[in-house]
Amino acid sequence: MKKYILAIDAGTTSSRAILFDKKGETVGVSQHEFTQHFPLESWVEHDGLEIWETQILAIKEVLQNNNVSASQIHAMGITNQRETTILWNKKTGIPVHRAIVWQDRRTADLCESLKKEGKASIFYEKTGLLLDAYFSGTKIKWILDQDPKLRKQAEDGELAFGTVDSWLIWKLTKGNIHVTDVTNASRTLLFNIHTLDWDEELLNILDIPKAILPRVTSCSEKIGTTAEGLFENTILISGIAGDQQAALFGQMCINVGDIKNTYGTGCFCIMNTGENPVKSKNKMLTTIGYQLNGKVYYALEGSVFIAGAAVQWLRDQLQIISSASEVESLAKTVENNGGVTFIPALAGLGAPYWNPNATGTIIGITRGTQKGHIARATLEAIAMRTKEIIVAMQKDANTTFKSLKVDGGGSINDLLMQIQANLLDAEVIRPDNTETTALGAAFFAGLATGYWNSIDNLSEIWKINKRFEPIQNKETQKIIDLWEKRIINVRNS
């Protein structure tokens, strides 16, 4: 009987389930979008139960559509949108508040207050993170501060906190297992990345009871099985990693200096720095890349909050395209950006600026500006924000990278990838299988069970689809010059 690895990819806008075979090839995919809630300006929420319902639907659908039974699933790996925060009642399994999404900025003022109290350095030294509303810790505090009853329940151990991985594992095991992995834990502002423990001092600062926190595992180990009756057979869960760390591993960025960028809702760039954490002098994040076979591998990360979301904005708000895939052909209707620069700070500016109050700007519009110019400027903006992060990372790590491995939905856009290569003046490499986030989760799950024997075995699976070599021209330098001149006003706003 042929066996497969099932990967759950619990993203920001959809729940996906992907089947992989021994060659690391995608056998089947099922995907269901869920609702994005925007109750107030800069607030972003999800319904935890809807995440669960769409995820279980995707799992059952991918099995059914590919005539695969649960008994053929060797193991399951889970990867997820990180930092998104869910609190639920342990007895009922019902969330006590909508999930607060990583993009949500409601705790920006709280972060500023903590900075004024001199707490930023404490958080950075222990977690490698900057004090920002992006991360889970202040989101947990905000939820508990809304209702004294919730705080009392939390202190009495009646509530559970989890990022989306924890929530789904809780539901898959019908409340028997409450865990997260080191990569997700490292994004909470509560986890000491040096001691690999929840940190009492940080918990005290944010007034968060330790009783609500999950047990922390490595990325690749046998965690437990799904509950009886959920599928016709129980399925072993043996891999967990936050989406960007999963993509790092799925891209086989296993050597010091290897770097990948995922083009999704946001852009997330990670460089493997090996077994030693590198402190950033350029406002990058020091984070855990993955933990495997007892060893922790660290990484530098820079996040662009708005990337693919800028293309969605062109589709949904400006309505100059009817689907995201049309942006490439629209951008190709013009030879250049026509002097237009789009700075897509639609949810503040992430690394290396970390300005939560920055807002988006389109500069250089004239009567001659066409839809194609705005489309092209959007792709250039995604590539420029990535360039800014990679330049900062190289300074921190004191290294010059040779190539950038790319994945995510945006990586199939050839024009964007060529613009990226031009702006970086470096090779951009797209793999055969761009499902690298899910593939990384599958790799972790399969290594824990012997489905794949070794990292060498995985390296043989990873194959290149296309290389984009840089082309230098005056237009490239013009894009850079205009950007550097124009972003000053936005980053200082």
Image (spheres, rainbow, N blue to C red):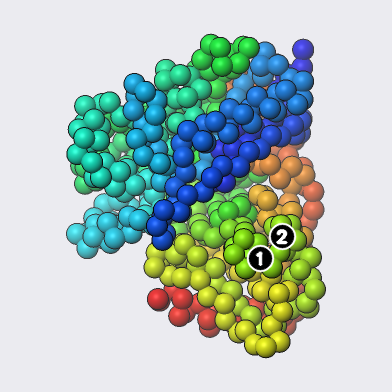
Q: Secondary structure at mark 1?
A: loop
Crowding at label 2, few (<14), some or many (≥20) Cα neighbours within 10 Å? few
Q: Is residue 2 left or right of residue 450?
A: right
Q: Report if residue 337 is visible in the image.
A: yes
The residue that disc 1 covers is: 319
Q: In the picture shown, does residue 13 fall above or below 402?
A: above
Crowding at label 1, few (<14), some or many (≥20) Cα neighbours within 10 Å? few
Q: Which quadrant does the N terminus fall into?
A: top right
Locate residue 424: give its quadrant.
bottom right
Q: Residue at x 64, y 31 (%)?
A: 58
Closer to the camera, 457 or 270?
A: 270
Q: In the picture shown, does residue 4 fall above or below 291?
A: above
Question: Quick one: which residue is furthest to the bottom in this view?
Answer: 367
Q: Secondary structure at mark 2?
A: loop
Tell me residue 456's x, y (percent): 68, 32
Q: In the picture shown, does residue 317 fall above or below 434?
A: below
Q: Residue at x 55, y 23 (%)?
A: 238
Tell me residue 206's x, y (percent): 24, 46
Q: Residue at x 26, y 41 (%)?
A: 144
Q: Residue at x 31, y 36 (%)?
A: 198
What amino acid is found at the position of numbered circle 1 in the picture? Gln
What amino acid is found at the position of numbered circle 2 in the picture? Ser
Tell me residue 384's x, y (percent): 60, 69
The residue that disc 2 covers is: 322
Q: In the picture shown, does residue 232 fall above or below 166?
A: above
Locate residue 34: give its quadrant.
top right
Q: Is residue 42 left or right of residue 2?
A: left
The reply to whether callout 2 and callout 1 are in contact (CB within 8 Å) is yes
Q: Is residue 186 left or right of residue 474?
A: left
Closer to the camera, 27 or 181?
A: 27
